[in-house]
Image: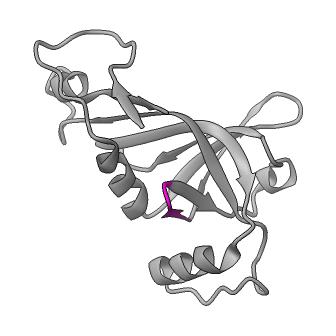
Amino acid sequence: MRASRPRMFGSVVEPVLLPWEWALDRLATSPQYWIATTRPDGRPHTRPVWGVLLDETPWFSTGSLAAGWITEGTPMTLHTESGQQVVILEGTATAATELEPICAAYNAKYAEQLTPDTLPGPFWGVRIEVAFGWMAAPTFVDGGSVFHGTATRWAP
């Protein structure tokens, strides 16, 4: 992924572009993700989900209402739960076809015992079209200097 500055309010003297590896590490270690989809009537739907990162693709499963309308190519966002080390992905849903590695990673991360034959529902990945990331000061009272100094946009 190629890094650049996103369009944003404010400015800094010397911004630092975060490397794509920084984003991948946050995705790999995030205890859960938040996904956002759109209901059939156009209203937004956002939920936390458990998920894993494999080969730069985040994979998740959900039993929420979204399970009924996520299909191959569904537009969606996925982001980490942290407000201090943020990673936001925009893209489309892709159905998992190789379930064994996803189950193995999921089992290791969450101490579960999933197998391809015992899944509670399908696993979906996010085909990333663009990603955003930044850091924020722990107190959030720095005038936004950490955010403005690290805000990064990644695109293929």
**Residue 133: image x %, image y %?**
36, 36
Give the residue furthest to the bottom: 113
Name the residue nearer the viewer: 71 or 42.
Answer: 71
- The answer to if 54 sits in the magenta stretch is yes
Q: Residue at x 77, y 76 (%)?
A: 120
Rendered view: 55 above or below 13: below
Q: Residue at x 69, y 87 (%)?
A: 115
- The answer to if 144 sits in the magenta stretch is no
**Quadrant in the picture for residue 140:** top left
**Quadrant in the picture for residue 113:** bottom right
**Residue 47: image x %, image y %?**
63, 50
Name the residue nearer the viewer: 139 or 137.
Answer: 137
User: Colour scheme used in the picture?
Assistant: one colour
**Residue 67: image x %, image y %?**
80, 56
Q: Quadrant of the N terminus?
A: top left
Q: Residue at x 36, y 41 (%)?
A: 86
Left or right side of 124 for 128: left
Left or right side of 121 for 146: left
Give the residue furthest to the top: 10
Rendered view: 116 above or below 152: below
Number of callouts in the render? 0
Name the residue nearer the viewer: 110 or 20.
Answer: 20
**Residue 28: image x %, image y %?**
41, 61
Magenta residues (range): 51-56
Q: Residue at x 68, y 64 (%)?
A: 61
The dominant secondary structure in magenta is strand
